[in-house]
Image (cartoon, rainbow, N blue to C red):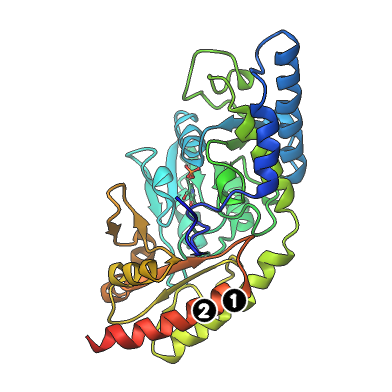
């Protein structure tokens, strides 16, 4: 199926960059299992370790701190289930893979701007019970950037471990394992122009994370299964290409068109007063349900999203906006626009015109 004429759903998945596809095709051309001892296997191992080093260098980690997985979901679950004997605290706006990793997780509240309540975290950690905390770098729905360094300091003060889901930050803001001061971090290739099927859990070298998948000794025994080499090479290429953020920074100015349009007609921009990713805006068109909006935009050739789409394609109410205390009718009329490497200014100005026309027409009905 061709990519829709105007694709504004990069936070769900970004189109794969052509340079990434070219590099992956070179790998696919030969049989390559990095665990094989023959020449083809050694060649595969070289590609695997080059990709690992390139990603490690870009985030100030050591190559042996990077464990490749098949998805961000797998990396999140490995991090949160792989550390035994600690209570788990997660922010209320995390991705469902974090929220559902363990049934006994305690929630950390967020404020009405969509930012984690650090004082609440501090209070929760005060009793000194060994804890593991998970706080995302940037939220997938609102784009709100979380104060992860501050969270890391609080965790350190109380002797708690910190995992950070940085899946949405990759390629859109600086992501530096060392600077963030976290113990574990998740990345996923398909959010930055790399392919589906490759992601990583970065874990401090002295931290023992029990494997989720056991069997072969791949990834230093931390994740069994032959590595998806073409996807991993594509992942490294995606990370490399997204290091230049000039284009993505420009997008914030373009998204201001739609935000001022929304506000001019009584709409709401969520998390607007908090630091946000440059590519994301979440806006409500009061009085028009997001399902109706999405169908209308889809018919006109614009791909955007709302809340999180479940596997049946229906829209579930956003747990992120609910956690921010947003009124129910506004939650039901909120959509997310997320742009990326191939988005043009024209894509956003034409979408803004369509948004305005849709809002005028549907409100009358
Ligand atoms: N974490 C966040 C913040 C996400 O937005 C997503 C995907 O939408 C994931 C984790 C899961 O990543 P993946 O699709 O690679 O499993």
Asked if one can make out residue 206 in the rendered structure from this viewpoint, the answer is no
Which residue position holds label 1? Answer: 346
Question: In the image, what residue occupies the spot 43% across and 65% down?
Answer: 304
Which residue position holds label 2? Answer: 350
Question: In the image, what residue occupies the spot 56% across and 46% down?
Answer: 190
Name the mark on residue 301. none
- In this view, the residue in front, 355 or 281, is 355
Relative to 138, say whether 355 is above or below: below
Give how far apart the Cα atoms at labels 1 and 2 are: 6 Å
Q: Quadrant of the C terminus?
A: bottom left
Relative to 142, say whether 1 is above or below: above
Relative to 19, say whether 359 is above or below: below
Q: Secondary structure at mark 2?
A: helix
Question: In the image, what residue occupies the spot 39% across and 38% down?
Answer: 101
Label 1 close to label 2 by CB (< 8 Å): yes
Pick out the residue farthest to the bottom.
264
- In this view, the residue in front, 287 or 98, is 287
Q: Secondary structure at mark 1?
A: helix
- In this view, the residue in front, 195 or 252, is 195
Residue 221 is left or right of residue 57, and the answer is left
């Amino acid at each position: 199926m061709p990519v829709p004429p105007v694709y504004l759903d990069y936070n769900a998945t970004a189109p794969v960059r052509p340079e990434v596809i070219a590099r992956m095709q070179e790998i696919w051309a030969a049989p390559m299992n990095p665990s094989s001892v023959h020449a083809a296997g050694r060649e595969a191992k070289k590609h695997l370790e080059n990709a690992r080093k390139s990603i490690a260098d870009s985030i100030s980690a050591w190559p042996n701190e990077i464990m490749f997985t098949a998805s961000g979901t797998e990396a999140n679950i490995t991090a949160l289930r792989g550390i035994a004997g600690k209570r788990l605290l997660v922010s209320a706006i995390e991705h469902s893979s974090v929220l559902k990793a363990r049934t006994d997780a305690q929630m950390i509240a967020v404020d009405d701007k969509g930012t984690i309540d650090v004082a609440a975290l501090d209070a929760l950690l005060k009793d000194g019970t060994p804890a593991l905390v998970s706080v995302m770098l940037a939220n997938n729905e609102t784009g709100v950037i979380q104060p992860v360094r501050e969270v890391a300091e609080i965790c350190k003060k109380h002797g708690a471990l910190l995992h950070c889901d940085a899946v949405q930050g990759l390629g859109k803001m600086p992501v530096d394992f060392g600077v963030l001061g976290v113990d574990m971090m998740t990345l996923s290739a398909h959010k930055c122009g790399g392919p589906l099927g490759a992601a990583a859990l970065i874990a401090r070298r002295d931290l023992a994370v029990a494997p989720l998948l056991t069997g072969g000794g791949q990834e230093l025994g931390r994740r069994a299964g032959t590595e998806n080499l073409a996807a991993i090479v594509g992942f490294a290429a995606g990370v490399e290409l997204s290091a230049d953020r000039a284009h993505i920074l420009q997008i914030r100015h373009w998204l201001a068109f739609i935000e001022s349009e929304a506000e001019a007609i009584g709409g709401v921009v969520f998390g607007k007063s908090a630091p946000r990713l440059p590519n994301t805006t979440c806006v409500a068109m009061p009085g028009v349900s997001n399902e109706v909006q999405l169908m209308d935009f889809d018919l006109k050739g614009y791909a955007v999203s709302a809340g999180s789409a479940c596997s049946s394609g229906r829209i579930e109410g956003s747990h992120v906006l609910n956690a921010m205390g947003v009124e129910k009718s506004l939650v039901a009329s909120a959509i997310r626009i997320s742009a990326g490497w191939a988005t043009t200014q024209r894509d956003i100005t034409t979408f803004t015109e369509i948004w305005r026309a849709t809002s005028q027409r549907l409100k009358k009905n």
